[in-house]
Amino acid sequence: MTDASSLLTDRYELTMLDAAIQAGTHERECVFEAFARRLPQGRRYGIVAGTGRLLELIEAFRFGDAELEWLAREGIVRTAALDWLADYRFRGTVSGYREGEVYFPNSPILIVDSTFAEGVILETLILSVLNYDSSVASAASRMVSAAAGRPLAEMGSRRTGERSAVAAARAAYIAGFGATSNLEAGRTWGIPTMGTAAHSFTLLHDSEEAAFQAQVDALGPSTTLLVDTFDVHRGVELAVRVAGPELGAVRIDSGDLPSLVTAVREQLDSLGNHRTKITVTNDLDEYTIAALAASPVDSYGVGTSVVTGSGSPAAGMVYKLVAHKDADDEWVSVAKKSAEKATVGGRKHPVRTMNASGRATAETIDVGETEEPKGSSRDLLVTLIDKGTVDTRYIGPAGVELARAHRSDAIAELPDHAFRLGRGEPIIPTIYV
């Protein structure tokens, strides 16, 4: 169970609730939808992430005495709204794309069926989680593709907020990273953790050789030694002298990586350390990883660029009311008509249309009446919360592993040119029918 506060939200959600209660419209049945109008930075696809932890946050979304007393003291809502919030728990239904799924512009990633009051106060929570986690996962997925099978570790905790660091590690792992440096992410979500020593450990000791010896004594010769505190080639020589042929890896955190990595590989081989691997961790992103494709790098550690979504720290998702029942208990589709922010009203049902080779060709979205997927189409919606009850398959460490596996399967459906790093249009169109 999470310790998230129901006040991690925007004031206008509660003032809308307050006004709707006074107007008598707060119990109207509604359909809300989370989607992205466009992909970050002209990318060709996005990855849905954050769903599992969002489900836990919704389950724990409560207003206790301390929150209610503060709302009353600040005069944010009136007594009727306070009484309603005191008994709040989400009792509606949430369906959506599975975590790890590929998404495109206007994909209905999350659909909330509830009363207006129950659904509207979740807006900030839903967008906070999906916008950040999906941005990280989308960037991380591009890095995984650029690495072409070489392992990546997430190590960006110090480049974002302390809560965001845990979320970023989780999202990167779902997108294909193999480990994280963040221990809370390991404890909470079951993600493998990694890490050995920083430059301060070397500087603590009387010499670089003494620092290496201390690390090998503690962690064994298969450890990874950081060799660029002073001179890289001198560091490699000392690392081999101390750890011998069983040295696990050397880490390089600075310099002209393509030429330096090649020179270090040649040096290690000349010293008989053919099995010692090279890992690099110097301000990497998908572009620098791709530039190292021809270099003898064995693994990568990525920090700032992954936890900031490689330049797009939010995925641009929005949360809109698309349908509600009117005073006559009839369903009414609603939509914004604002310039450049227009939306499509009505309940939606998305499927991914596939060709005979099992590759995606379109995101086809039925509006209104739902039809069963035809031919080789794949249904994209699953039920995540059913009348207030969370589907436990999608939460906790097991949910993370399920999302990681699903991302791998979903990525395999995309055409090969989806993985080009240059800016481009979404790899398949979104078609409303």
Image (tube, rainbow, N blue to C red):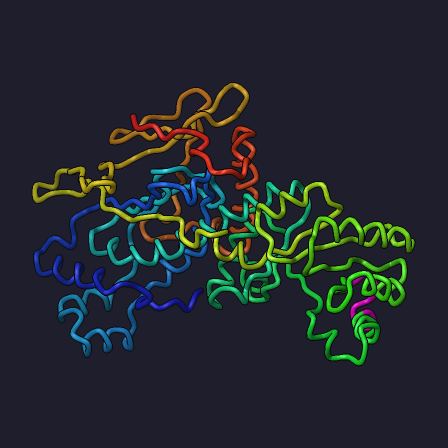
| Image quadrant in which the C terminus is located | top left
> Camera-side residue: 269 or 121?
269
Left or right: 364 with respect to 256? left
Vertical position of residue 184 compared to residue 174: above or below: below
**Does residue 98 show up magenta in the picture?**
no
Which stretch did the figure color magenta? 216-223
Q: Quadrant of residue 405?
A: top right
Left or right: 201 with respect to 78? right
Which residue is found at the position 36% from the left and 26% from the top? 372
Residue 208: x, y in percent? 80, 73
> Camera-side residue: 103 or 388?
103
Residue 150: x, y in percent? 68, 45
Residue 249: x, y in percent? 78, 57
Left or right: 168 with respect to 274? left
> Camera-side residue: 376 or 169?
169
Which residue is found at the position 71% from the left and 41% from the top? 294
Which residue is found at the position 51% from the left and 63% from the top? 165
Vertical position of residue 123 compared to residue 72: above or below: above
The number of numbered badges drawn on the structure is 0
Vertical position of residue 253 compared to residue 197: above or below: above
Vertical position of residue 26 compared to residue 183: above or below: above
| Image quadrant in which the N terminus is located | bottom left
Residue 29: x, y in percent? 19, 47
Q: Quadrant of residue 332?
A: top left
